[in-house]
Image: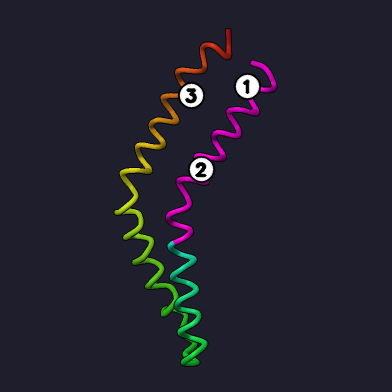
Amino acid sequence: MTDTAVIEIALKTMLVAAKLSAPILVTSLVIGFAVSLFQSMTQIQEFTLAFVPKLVGVGIALLVSGNWMLHTLMAFTHDLFDALPSMLG
């Protein structure tokens, strides 16, 4: 296995990881910003007020994008297993 093959696999792995984490991270970021804005306007400083909406939002994001995430990960794994024999030989 050459250095370029290892770098190519690492690059594809990082891109897939970024794609898979994006829906959850963006959802958490948007909800966190909205809750922080609400807390700063009302001066309510309650920690559970930030936690519960994020938890619900991330759960909904997982329900909505979970099927796509699973198919993306399975396609990456199949592509990796299909490419391994040519890289090793």
Quarter of the rendering occupied by the N terminus: top right
Q: Please give the name of the residue rendered at 34% of the width and 60% of the height, measured from the top-left corner.
A: 59
> What predominant SS class does the magenta segment belong to?
helix
Mark 1, Cα crowd under 10 Å, few <14 / some 14-19 / many 20+, is some
Pointer 2 local density, CA inside 10 Å: few below 14, some 14–19, many at least 20: some
> Callout 2, which amino acid?
Ala
Q: Which mark is residue 80?
A: 3
Q: Secondary structure at mark 2?
A: helix
Residue 53's quadrant in the figure?
bottom left
Give the structural element (helix, strand or loop) at label 3: helix
Residue 84: image location, x then y, percent: 52, 17
Q: How packed is label 3: few (under 14 Cα within 10 Å), some, or many (20 or more)?
A: some
Estimate the spatial distance between the alpha carbons at disc 1 and disc 2, rounded to whole Å: 18 Å
Q: Quadrant of the C terminus?
A: top right
Task: In the rendered structure, find residue 5 and report the number of the disc placed on it.
Answer: 1
Query: Which element type, helix, strand or loop, lies under badge 1?
Result: helix
Please tell me whether residue 31 is drawn above or below residue 47 in the rendered image: above
Q: Is residue 83 magenta?
A: no
Give the labeled residue for mark 2: 17
Write the residue at 38% across / 73% down. Answer: 52
What residue lies at 45% left-to-right and 78% top-to-bottom? 35
Please name the amino acid that badge 1 sits on: Ala
Q: CA distance from mark 1 to mark 3?
A: 11 Å
Residue span colored magenta: 1-26
Q: Position of residue 67 (x, y in %)?
A: 31, 44
Dot placed on the residue nearer the N-terminal end, 1 or 2: 1
Mark 1 or 3 closer to N-term? 1
**Which residue type does callout 3 highlight?**
Leu
